[in-house]
Image (cartoon, grey):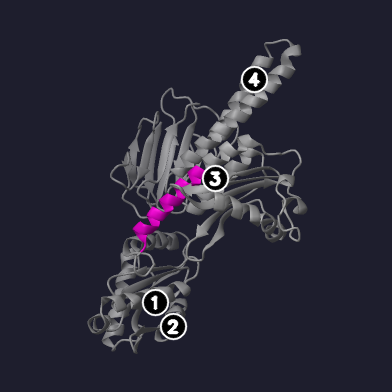
Amino acid sequence: MKVLITDKNGQILYEGSPNLQGDGIVIGSGNDCDIQLNKMGISRRQIQLRYNSDGYLTLQDLQSPYGTVINGKKILPGFVTTIQPGCFIELSDEVFVSLQLEGNENSISLEDDRFFPFFLNSNESFVRKSFATIRSKIPRQYYPALSATEGEIVTRIKELSAVLEVSYALNSISSFPRLLDFTLEMAINVTGGERAVMLLFNEELGRLETVAMVNFVNNEISEDLQATSFLVSRCFDTGESLIGPSHNFRNPNEKLKGPEDVGILSIAIVPLKEMSNNIGVLYVDTKHSGNIMTSRTDQMLKIFAAQASVAINRTKMYHSATTDPITGVANENLFMQRLAEEFCRSQRYRKDISLILMDLDHFSVINENYGENTGNRVLKEVGKMFRSATRIHDLVARFGADSFAMLLPETPFAGAMVAANKLKLSLSKTKVRSGNQTIMVTGSFGISSSSAATTKPGDLLKLAEKSLKLARKRGGNQIA
């Protein structure tokens, strides 16, 4: 297979015939990639190309910022799909891959596009085709017994494949919410359930909170979850799995509804564990009479719960590595990564992007007069103020000892100026007590926005630093 990689100007970045058997090749910007591309918008490990065991050519998006486009169809980060030679792959706005057969190479044609989950579909299809072949070679009177055996094997194959899918996804899907949703989807697929919820214990608030939910209708959520809340609490408190028909689980408070009262016919609840501690609950139910979950469901759900716990632990580690421990906002490393990603996205879709840098005025004096602990309390309050002012796609980061940065995607200069004025006003209302004294806080703000002159992320940062320097020169507590 010939791999040709070009940029938007037609310049060839790579041309060759790498071995796509076995583990295939990885394309990205990292030194450990088989094909290294030092281009904007290319992540450290972007995609993997390889032939699978069935002989199909596959592409997996490993950790791209926004997905990989194949013949105009977007593959989200973490997903696997089969592809055909001749397809056109867009790694970013500026980097393109084409695949061509060489010499006597043959390609297995695809009946349809098969996206992640991949193993579940292909393994079940293999079993079905194998039994169809067997039927064609045996007398018809053996068909009923063969069908019963086929059904049992398919069930077991689905269980094993689902476990494999979730294990694979754990190392492939970088989005924590997407990974949890996928785990719930696999749990439903295997157990015969219809709906699923994952809840984690919030230590600060002292309660279980929903972090992922699949197939719940809006008008059912409140009543149904309330009717099963006593079972969720019991599972979390005792670490006991609760599985079976809903009539086995009546609400001890007769004045309140139980699961059977809201139409739930079967239920399965298993605890999530971190070491020996319960950290949450995995919940699956059904309102369909044909899907009654059994004790075998318990074993499968415990496997999925264990996989989810691994994902949760991994996310905690990621949070620790990317969060400033004092303020709770992002650290500088994560900020620089997101700045590059969002700037690339703004260039790709021709959207505005703005950046606000803020220095606390006279912060060194606060440390000298009141001590480092009080200084840290000031930073923590400022971080909290910044977080409360962000939209869902904005990013706030600590950017140095006494500096903060706010990244504003899809925001022009005028919008950034409005945001900076709100921050300045909120900052003026931030007060920290130290003994009998009240510490007032002000800051200097520098704004930059994308323009024809900003061709790379560093340009946006330099302009913001220049504006910040001007605000400090004016005496502080200013916006420039």
Pointer 1 or 2: first along the chain: 1
Query: Which is closer to the viewer, label 1 or label 2?
Result: 1
Asked whether the viewer can see residue 70, the reply is no
Pointer 3 or 1: first along the chain: 3
Q: Are marks 2 and 4 in contact (CB under 8 Å)?
A: no
Name the residue tied to disc 1. Answer: 381
Name the residue tied to disc 4. Answer: 131
How many residues crowd around disc 1 within 10 Å: few (fewer than 14), some, or many (20 or more)? some
The residue at the point 71 percent across, 39 percent down is 291
Pointer 2 or 4: first along the chain: 4
Pointer 4 or 3: first along the chain: 4
Q: CA distance from mark 1 to mark 2?
A: 11 Å
Q: CA distance from mark 4 to mark 1?
A: 66 Å
Q: CA distance from mark 2 to mark 3?
A: 41 Å
Is 459 left, or right, of 412 in this rendering? Answer: left
How many residues crowd around disc 4 within 10 Å: few (fewer than 14), some, or many (20 or more)? some
Name the residue tied to disc 2. Answer: 426
Q: Are marks 3 and 1 in contact (CB under 8 Å)?
A: no
Pointer 4 or 1: first along the chain: 4
Callout 3 amino acid: Thr
* Stretch of the chain drawn in magenta: 305-323
- SS for callout 4: helix
- SS for callout 3: helix
Q: CA distance from mark 3 to mark 1?
A: 37 Å
